[in-house]
Amino acid sequence: MKRNGILFVISAPSGAGKTSLCRQIIDIFPNMRHSVSFTTRPRRSGETDGVDYHFVSQEIFDTMVAEGAFAEWARVHGNCYGTALATLQEARDQGQDLLLDIDCQGAQQLKRHCPDGVFIFILPPSLEELERRLRGRNTDSPEVIGRRLANARREIRELVWYDYLIVNDDLSQAVEKFKGIILAEGCRSSRTREEAIRLFGIDMQDLETTA
Ligand code: ADP
Ligand code: 5GP
């Protein structure tokens, strides 16, 4: 049954496993695309411009903000990150589901503008395990890790307004839960009803008079 693309917005403290989870989800669902954000953060080894992020200077980022090019943007861990309106529009035009890995400030901006988006918060099993994962990833300096851990304590409080919570303890179990959410949201009556009515030739006026 045809339906419009869905916006899946994922937030989590850094190191909770968002990237690992999202990679698997993109591989499983052919109609799901990863939203490539713009950032002023320096590229990490192994990252590709245009694939992981669009890496831009502060000057270019500021110009995009001034031109109203972002659906949301925020300063996270000392760098700027934003989702371009064009990215959302392109997915909508192509009927594709979009996976946005963004921080809580950006997610809250989107919740106001896209109320039918699906907002998912990924939790680590504990703060101790979060620290272990950040150190084990070996991508950030001890100073950056310290800042990310301090931010994590604040970010976790935001879980209260998300639609779904997934604890990423065992990665494959977390993927299964994520898959369940995506499948259920795709079947939501509010997203598929119109197409079903058309498909089965239901006369809405007829329904109203017989009700
Ligand atoms: P994020 O994108 O949220 O910052 P990553 O996906 O980069 O997090 O994961 C942080 C580190 O933790 C990585 O080294 C990753 O391999 C590891 N990791 C992710 N999920 C799990 C898990 N369920 N159990 C153990 N390690 C994990
Ligand atoms: P990282 O530097 O580890 O890739 O990401 C740091 C944080 O920035 C993560 O919490 C990630 O979700 C967030 N982030 C990535 N892209 C965006 C974006 O486009 N907008 C916002 N608001 N946050 C983002």
Image (cartoon, helix red, strand yellow):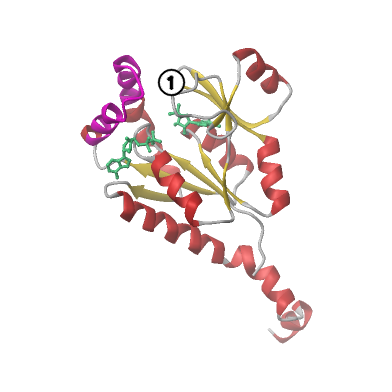
Asked if the residue at label 1 sits under 8 Å from ligand 2, the reply is yes
The part of the image, by quadrant, that contains residue 190 is bottom right
Name the side, left or right, on which 50 lies relative to 26: right
Q: Total marks drawn? A: 1
Q: Quadrant of the C terminus?
A: bottom right
The residue closer to the viewer here, 122 or 43, is 43
Q: Residues within 10 Å of mark 1 (few under 14, many from 20)?
A: some
Residue shown at the point (69%, 22%) measured from the top left: 64
Image quadrant of ligand 1 equals top left
Which range of residues does the magenta coloring cover? 129-150
Residue indicated by mark 1: 77
Q: Main secondary structure of the magenta part?
A: helix
Any magenta on residue 107?
Answer: no
Residue shown at the point (52%, 37%) measured from the top left: 107
Name the side, left or right, on which 169 lies relative to 193: left
The part of the image, by quadrant, that contains residue 135 is top left
Name the side, left or right, on which 201 lies relative to 79: right
Amino acid type indicated by mark 1: His
Please, is residue 126 above or below residue 47 in the view?
below
| Furthest residue in direction left, as rendered | 128
Please, is residue 191 above or below residue 54 in the view?
below
| Furthest residue in direction bottom, as rendered | 210
Q: Tell me where residue 1 appears, x and y as whole percent.
A: 64, 70
Residue shown at the point (38%, 43%) measured from the top left: 122
Secondary-structure class at tag 1: loop
The part of the image, by quadrant, that contains residue 30 is bottom right
The residue closer to the viewer here, 206 or 46, is 46
Q: Tell me where residue 15 appears, x and y as whole percent.
A: 34, 33
Please, is residue 98 above or below residue 67 in the view?
below
Any magenta on residue 137?
Answer: yes
Q: Tell me where residue 118 appears, x and y as whole percent.
A: 52, 50
